[in-house]
Amino acid sequence: MHPELLHIGPLTIYTYGLMMATAFLVCYFILKHEAVKRGDNPDFASSIIFWGAIGGILGAKIFYLIEFFRDVLQDPVGTIFSGAGLVFHGGLIGGATAVVLLIVLSKKPLGEWADIVGPVLLIGQGIGRIGCFFAGCCHGIACDLPWAVTFPYASPPANYPVHPTQLYEMLINISLFFVLVKLIRPRMKRVGMTFALYLIFAGMERFFIEFIRVNLKVSLGLSSAQFTSMALVLAGLIIAIFFTKAKSENPATGKDQLRNKSSE
């Protein structure tokens, strides 16, 4: 564990904070490149990052307060205003909501920009997990694999070899980004489908990784993150069905219009 990367006088550079900043920067440059390719104002990329970050932090905090409501009752001020205590899926939902509102209010094509932003989130998640690894959070259960890691100062501590689930997620997320951007999106003719697949892939990845992560089980032997993951997969399926139906209805509508014109 290396939660503190270096000290410059009184200033401490935390590894987690550095990786989060790196994640935002990398996502910004990718989005800026995509905006330029589309002929849009590249400044729109910085707006997405800014409001995505604000929405993500608020969402992550709100979900944490809901999940650990007993702690809020015991120490409401300390829990609410603490810098710690953030739930990943809450951040994803809050950030996505903020970005969707920004795209709609900016009168940009929602489906097209969702297809761009979705895969980029995977890069951000992947880089962020490197920060989790060095901070010692989000580690896995005990194992005897050659690449097992110990996190003696983590919460909860692991003085024994455990799965480095943070690195698993980093590799999976970055791999999924390239699968979506290089293999799927160029061949996908239906707008919104890439984003739908992002939700499905992200939900499935987190659902299965939870089985080897140390996490509180809330019901049916599943963690709260797994229930949220199932909701993400369901949302992805609903979006995919919606865009599939919209695509299939358009040709029929066009034919009907042609028939009406010819009859006139």
Image (spheres, rainbow, N blue to C red):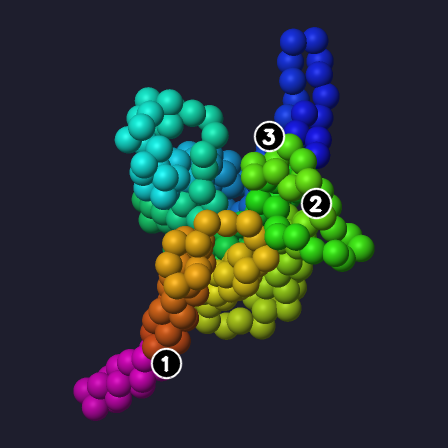
Which labelled disc corresponds to residue 248? Answer: 1
Label 2: element kind: strand
Q: Give the amino acid type for the residue marked by disc 3 in the picture.
A: Gly
In screen coordinates, is 55 left or right of 74?
right
Residue under pointer 3: 17
User: Between disc 2 and disc 3, whose residue precedes?
Assistant: 3
- 237 up-or-down from 60: above or below: below
Q: Which residues are magenta?
A: 247-264
Q: Is residue 253 magenta?
A: yes
Q: Nearer the viewer, residue 169 or 27?
A: 169
Label 1: element kind: helix
Q: Position of residue 58 (x, y in %)?
A: 38, 35
User: Between disc 3 and disc 1, whose residue precedes?
Assistant: 3
Q: Position of residue 30 (x, y in %)?
A: 61, 46
Q: How many marks?
A: 3
Residue at (19% x, 87% y) in the render: 264
Which labelled disc corresponds to residue 160? Answer: 2
The answer to whether residue 60 of the structure is visible from this angle is: yes
Q: Give the amino acid type for the residue marked by disc 1 in the picture.
A: Ser
Which labelled disc corresponds to residue 156? Answer: none
- For the residues bearing labels 1 and 2, Cβ distance under 8 angstroms: no
